[in-house]
Amino acid sequence: MYAKKLVVSTYLQYVVIALGALLLFTFVRQIGGVLLTFLLAGILAYALNPVIRWLEAWRVPRVVAVFGVFVALVVVVLVALLVLIIPAVGQVQALIQNPEILTDGITSLVSWAQGVPYVGEQISAVDRTRLTEFVQSNAPSAGQVANGALGFIGGVFGVFGTMLNLLLMLIVSIYLLLDKERISGAALGAVPGTIRDQTVGLFHAVESALVKYLKAQLSLCVIMGVLGWAISYFTFGDYALLIGLWVGVMEIIPVLGAFLGAVPAVLIALFTGGLTQGLVVAGLFLLAQQLEGNVLVPRIMGGSVGVHPLWVLFATLAATALYGIIGAVFAVPIVAIIASAFRYLRGTLLFERWRKAPVTEAVVEIEPNVEVSGEKTTGLRDPAGREG
């Protein structure tokens, strides 16, 4: 014998849905780091999946294709470390071990500033004894040094945590690629049959947009890195490889990457060659940024994202506030995924008209010459017969 059925009112359903959404939001915020790792793993798997399919078309087993692609990826990273990053680190060490470059540059800048009419008088009036006393009085205390050391140790552990998250991201992406058929089959099995074909089309649209964006972004990073190297090499010569690598990496960060990439080059040129060389390098990087914004980005990036730049800026700032530099790097690909999904759904879904509009206009009848308080005025009466 079955128990009597209970009818849940729509009001109670709305309350439960609101509470469930609130609990889900709180839960997502608590495990934001874990979700970010899985999201990045999914993006990496999506980006590499076309290469895996291409290898499968050449009758390469999927397991061999997946591990071969990841081995090739690791080899590329190691070659980049050997060819680019290690010499760049050597240049940084040379810059640190030769502080005369910076001191000579600062001395030349101070000498030039002393020749400026008003600024030179202010610099000459600075009492070195007072300056020394000011530095000594503002020197960090023992407690501040201890806090700084603890912060440094925490930063070191943060680096290890980041490396662990990267390793977990690689493992999850490998698992997603190896078990793609079973995972996609289980996901599609949970989707109603009436929308199964549209769901597959949505996944293909998202994958196509993501791959298109990644190819364009990689090409843009290489081109801007080469331009940064050329500007540094043909102006002050030293540290050109370091500057080119820095500019290429900073190009990953949308909006602010071009500015951040130019700052070290301008400072090095300013300290090593004086004000004139610094202004020349700043002007050349400004031209490179104009070339990037007006020629390279429209031609290379094209419509890979398909949203207004203000939305990209908003997404970058929001992701930076939530997840730091990692959020800034992955903000645009996530925007590309969301935009491609909306474009596909807009061309696929047809919304049925509502049988009854939630908000309707009030229909009133006007009765002229109604006497109120001895005066004739206009009376309003709605269809229910209530006067207004």
Image (spheres, grey):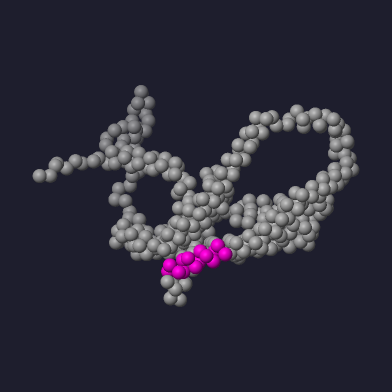
Q: Residue furthest top?
A: 373
Tell me where residue 154 appears, x and y as whole percent. Answer: 58, 40
Horizontally, is 81 left or right of 208 in the view? right
Quadrant location of the N terminus? top left
Q: Is residue 217 above or below residue 354?
A: below
* Residue drawn where x is 44% and y is 73% of the image: 60
* Residue drawn where x is 45% and y is 42% of the image: 29
Residue 68 on the magenta segment: yes
Tell me where residue 6 appears, x and y as whole percent. Answer: 19, 41
Residue 65 on the magenta segment: yes
Horizontally, is 156 left or right of 183 in the view? right
Q: Is residue 159 above or below residue 302?
A: above
Question: Relative to the observer, which residue lies in front, 255 or 355?
Answer: 255
Chain part drawn in magenta: 62-75
Main secondary structure type of the part rendered in magenta: helix
Horizontally, is 212 left or right of 241 in the view? left
Quadrant location of the C terminus? top left
* Residue drawn where x is 82% and y is 48% of the image: 100
Question: Relative to the observer, which residue lies in front, 202 or 269?
Answer: 269
Tell me where residue 195 appears, x and y as whole percent. Answer: 33, 61
